[in-house]
């Protein structure tokens, strides 16, 4: 199955292999986040703080639904990665086509349901009336684009599972440039407001998904000789559901805490919403590389699990934690010096209340990036080894942490509680994932495996 654009992660030094595989993922996720970041900057600078607050108040619902999509598609990629590690091309092709049918069903159900429920859900979290109309317009366009989100995540995940992390990154770069152009066109030239920002994101992601699909179908041998493999296979469908849907629910369970947190933020007023939105978008630009290394670890663990190389999984954990903690220290230093500058990029010049709250948010959360980086390694190791149920249970820890942060914000700490919500979520989930990795990996290592240095 391997070709010149894919990597065999069952061979070579773990730290080198993880770095080489993850670097394109880092670039790709940064480009993907650029969609959202450019939307935020364009809306904040060209329309105003109220429009930015409208976009920001949709974040938790976005996380709840699109997070489920992303998690499920990452999960669908785990059996593909395991088939790659086992050199089982036939299983890879069956898993791919059964994943296609699942994605079609998922897209139809989620698009219809979320579009109809958008306004009631925004009212449920007490979205201020002065920004409700813009929030509804923005999130409904995003929800109509769910099929494009699924197309991108599934096809890019299939390529990554086969060991090709470069091609999805290239396609994401091209669509990111398109997103910047469309953002300016649909906000500044054609004044569509927040709906224009959402439409630019959807169209750009659709282009990226189509490019990945075209590459899989026309430029690789991944799907050649698929006669008789395109139909529904109950065992393959069941495995995809067993791994994919729990990972989707893990993202959604975690996102429920974000919904509670958003309810608390909404109670603090428009300035708090805008300040947290700006700070969170900047935070995501810095923590996405950690998530990319985690995605790389999921593929690494999946391939080595499929090959029975459990000692390499252990070596990969140590190597990837070294990468994460080194990056966390550097990111904290950059934010410490530049948090005011980064806030100004999003909100524009000035020292208003939203800017002050954004700076506070960044100052607190950046000190605890190490929790997030470590969680990404431990959780993705569990997922790569097929223990998706435990990833869901770790999401309950995130729900607890964000709910606690929201409660503290509403009852005692105010905006500081919002600043602490994500670190609390990461910490609770990390404790659980670390315990489960030690348990399950230790059990497999006792079965006896080959050398990690091979």
Image (tube, rainbow, N blue to C red):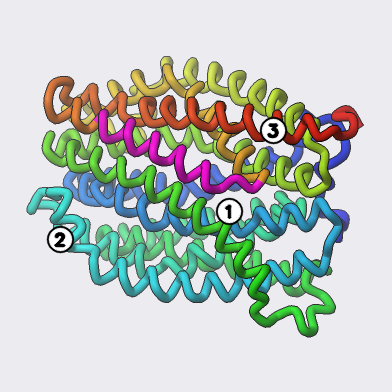
- Does the magenta-highlighted stretch encompass residue 30? no
In contact (CB < 8 Å): disc 2 and disc 3: no
Q: Give the left or right position of residue 14, taking residue 210 as reference.
A: right
Highlighted magenta segment, given as a residue range: 386-405
Q: Which of 285 and 117 is in front in this view?
A: 117
Q: What element carries label 3?
A: helix
The quarter of the displayed image where residue 244 is located: bottom right
Q: What element carries label 2?
A: helix
Front label number (1 vs 3): 3
List x then y, in percent, for residue 138.
27, 60
Alpha carbon separation for disc pair 2 and 3 = 50 Å
Q: Where does label 2 land, which residue?
A: 133
For residue 30, above or below residue 227: above
Q: Where does label 3 land, which residue?
A: 441
Q: Give the left or right position of residue 274, taking residue 208 as reference.
A: left
List x then y, in percent, for residue 29.
56, 45
């Amino acid at each position: 199955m391997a070709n010149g654009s894919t990597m065999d992660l069952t061979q070579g030094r773990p730290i080198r292999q993880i770095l080489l595989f993850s670097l394109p993922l880092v670039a790709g996720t940064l480009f993907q986040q650029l969609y959202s970041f450019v939307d935020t900057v364009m809306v904040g600078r060209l329309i105003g703080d109220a429009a930015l607050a409208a976009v920001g108040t949709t974040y938790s619902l976005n996380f709840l639904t699109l997070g489920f999509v992303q998690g499920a598609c990452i999960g669908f990629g785990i059996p593909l990665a395991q088939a790659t590690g086992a050199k089982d091309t036939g299983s890879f092709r069956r898993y791919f086509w059964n994943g296609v049918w699942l994605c079609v069903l998922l897209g139809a159900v989620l698009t219809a349901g979320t579009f109809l429920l958008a306004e009631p859900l925004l009212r449920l979290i007490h979205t201020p009336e002065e920004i409700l109309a813009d929030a509804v317009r923005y999130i409904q366009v995003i929800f109509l684009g769910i099929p494009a989100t699924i197309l991108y995540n599934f096809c890019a995940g299939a390529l990554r599972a086969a060991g090709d992390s470069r091609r999805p990154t290239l396609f994401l770069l091209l669509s990111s440039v398109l997103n910047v152009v469309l953002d300016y066109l649909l906000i500044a030239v054609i004044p569509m407001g927040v709906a224009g920002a959402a439409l630019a994101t959807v169209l750009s992601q659709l282009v990226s998904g189509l490019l990945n699909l075209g590459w899989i179908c026309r430029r690789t041998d991944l799907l050649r000789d698929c006669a008789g493999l395109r139909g529904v296979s109950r065992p393959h469908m069941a495995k995809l559901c067993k791994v994919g849907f729990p990972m989707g629910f893990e993202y959604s369970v975690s996102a429920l805490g974000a919904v509670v947190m958003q309810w608390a933020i909404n109670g603090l007023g428009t300035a708090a919403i805008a300040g947290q939105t700006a700070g969170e978008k900047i935070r995501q630009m810095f923590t996405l590389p950690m998530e990319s290394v985690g995605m790389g670890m999921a593929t690494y663990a999946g391939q080595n699990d499929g090959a029975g190389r459990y000692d390499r999984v252990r070596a990969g954990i140590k190597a990837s934690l070294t990468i994460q903690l080194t990056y966390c220290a550097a990111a904290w230093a950059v934010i410490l010096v530049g948090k005011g500058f980064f806030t100004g990029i999003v909100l524009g010049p000035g020292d208003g209340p939203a800017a002050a709250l954004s700076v506070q948010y960044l100052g607190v959360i950046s000190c605890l990036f190490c929790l997030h980086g470590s969680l990404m390694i431990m959780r993705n190791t569990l997922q790569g080894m097929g223990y998706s149920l435990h990833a869901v249970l770790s999401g309950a820890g995130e729900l607890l942490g964000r709910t606690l942060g929201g409660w503290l914000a509403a009852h005692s700490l105010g905006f500081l509680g919002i600043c602490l919500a994500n670190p609390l979520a990461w910490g609770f989930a990390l404790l659980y994932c670390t315990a489960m990795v030690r348990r399950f990996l230790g059990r497999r290592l006792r079965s006896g495996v080959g050398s990690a240095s091979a």
